[in-house]
């Protein structure tokens, strides 16, 4: 299978512990900066902080952290983390390419180095002027009676320089096209209709996994988030993966069930909606996947139990769970198509691989699992898959 993904690849910098009660943090909080400051439990763009304050973002960060904290670095981004999980599950039996933008700076070189072992084709990962995208994660483990909380500052940087018109035709030379969290790459997101139309014309499958759209939420907090240009453009989406809040914000309806109806009426061929530890709800019109209608499947009890019983001093980290979920769905779909091209793939089986991939991602720090040997992650996922079959009493063949 030929799989190409597009979107944001960035560096996640985890700063911990940060005191959310400190004067420095309060000075830059949203309450003191007319909606443009740091949001406890939410995300703000570093560029917005710079524009509203007239200060360089690095100065702001140093003030908050006291220049003492050395961050833990990880590769992040909804597109690249999903692709890495696909590569690990398919274990070399695929052609995977990533299209995006980075700068020739420390973070850009860090990402390129970290991506090398996964065998992902980076010829479409262009180097441009500016800064490589990053997200600084400020963590206060003692916040809210020691329940902990995080705040996110995203710097779009080089990712903001790409538009859909910049993407070369080679991207569309694929069986499956993945658009991962394009809300973090504004130019690509605004051209999503253009991209999926080209994908459809090229005979590709268009798969989209969303991310919280902070840009459009800030611009129009009372309006639905735009995903594609017109309602009829939804018919070019073969699979849409989003969480409960995201589908509500995009569709403008209140419940997951209403969101399914919204997307089905507009022609989306299949939908998967996650909601934390609640059941996953799925829909298929039967055109691509063999299932028809709406069904739900539970999350992994084994992964949940392991998160609750992590060793002392460790903590479940949900960073990248959604991105790995999407990668698991895509990998299973690709594998089913590869193994039996004459039979429609099972959305239920694909969703299960998403569930165990997302669950496993909560058992380690960061979104990417770095293997000690090739195939290590797949072995661990197979164990979770077999435990999930026992949990549900289904074979998912």
Image (cartoon, rainbow, N blue to C red):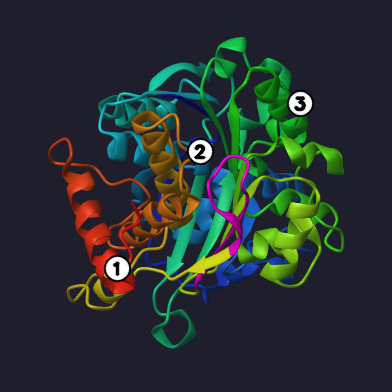
Disc nearer the start of the sequence (2/3):
2
Q: Which residue is mark 1?
A: 303
Q: How many other residues sit within 10 Å of disc 3, few (<14), some (14-19) or many (≥20)?
A: some
In what element is the residue under mark 2?
A: helix
Query: In the rendered structure, which disc, 3 or 1, sits on the residue that comes first in sequence?
Result: 3
Q: CA distance from mark 2 to mark 3?
A: 18 Å
Judge left or right: residue 261 versus residue 168.
right
- Using the image, tell me which numbered label, if any, was put on residue 194: 3
Q: Which residue lies at the image location 39% right of the left edge and 74% below the top edge?
A: 141
Among the 4 quarters of the image, the one containing residue 195: top right
N-terminal-most mark, 2 or 1: 2
Q: Residue at x 45, y 41 (%)?
A: 330
Give x and y (percent) for residue 95. Answer: 38, 21
- Nearest the viewer among 64 and 281 is 281
Separation of disc 3 and disc 1 at Cα? 39 Å
Q: Quadrant of residue 51?
A: top right
Mark 3 and mark 1 residues within 8 Å of each other at the beta carbon: no
At mark 3, the secondary structure is: helix
Q: Residue 115, how many percent across, how many down?
A: 33, 29
Magenta region = 279-294
Does 389 lie within the magenta span?
no
- Circle 2 sits on which residue? 79
**Residue 103 image label:** none
Q: Nearer the viewer, residue 307 or 298?
A: 298
Mark closer to the observer (2, 3): 3
| Residue 182 visible in rendering | yes
- 15 relative to 30, above or below: above
Q: Is residue 289 found inside the magenta-colored segment of the image?
A: yes
Question: In the picture shown, does residue 173 fall above or below 38?
Answer: above
Looking at the image, the residue that sits furthest to the top is 169
Q: Are dots 2 and 1 in contact, CB under 8 Å?
A: no
């Amino acid at each position: 299978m030929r799989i190409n993904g597009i979107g944001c690849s960035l560096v996640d910098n985890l700063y911990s512990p940060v005191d959310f009660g400190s004067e420095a943090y309060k000075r830059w909080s949203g309450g003191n900066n007319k909606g443009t400051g740091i949001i406890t439990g939410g995300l703000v763009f570093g560029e917005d902080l710079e524009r509203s304050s007239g200060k360089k973002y690095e100065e702001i960060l140093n003030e908050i952290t006291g220049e003492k904290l050395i961050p833990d670095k990880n590769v992040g981004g909804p597109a690249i983390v999903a692709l890495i999980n696909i590569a690990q599950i398919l274990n070399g039996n695929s052609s995977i390419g990533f299209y995006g933008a980075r700068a020739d700076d420390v973070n850009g070189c860090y990402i390129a180095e970290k991506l090398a072992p996964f065998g992902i084709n980076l010829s479409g990962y262009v180097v441009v002027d500016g800064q490589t995208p990053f997200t600084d994660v400020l963590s206060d483990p003692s916040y809210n009676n020691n329940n902990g909380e995080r705040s996110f500052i995203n710097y779009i940087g080089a990712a903001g320089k790409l538009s859909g018109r910049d993407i070369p035709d080679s991207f569309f030379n694929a069986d499956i096209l993945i658009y991962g969290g394009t809300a973090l790459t504004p130019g690509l997101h605004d051209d999503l209709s253009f991209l999926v139309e080209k994908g459809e014309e090229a005979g590709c499958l268009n798969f989209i996994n969303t991310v919280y759209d902070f840009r459009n939420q800030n611009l129009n907090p009372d309006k639905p988030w735009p995903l594609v240009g017109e309602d009829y453009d939804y018919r070019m989406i073969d699979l849409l993966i989003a969480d409960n809040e995201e589908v509500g914000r995009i569709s403008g309806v209140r419940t997951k069930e209403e969101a399914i109806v919204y997307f089905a009426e507009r022609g989306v061929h299949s939908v998967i909606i996650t909601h934390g530890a609640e059941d996953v709800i799925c829909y298929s019109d039967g055109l691509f996947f063999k299932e028809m209608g709406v069904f739900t499947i539970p999350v992994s009890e084994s992964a949940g139990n392991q998160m609750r019983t992590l060793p002392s001093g460790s903590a479940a980290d949900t960073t990248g769970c959604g991105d790995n979920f999407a990668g698991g769905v895509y990998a299973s779909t690709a594998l089913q198509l590869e193994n039996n091209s004459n039979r429609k793939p099972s959305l239920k089986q694909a969703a299960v691989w998403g569930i165990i991939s997302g669950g496993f991602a909560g058992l380690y720090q960061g979104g990417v699992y770095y293997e000690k040997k090739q195939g290590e992650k797949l072995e661990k996922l197979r164990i979770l898959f077999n435990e999930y079959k026992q949990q549900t009493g289904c074979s998912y063949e």
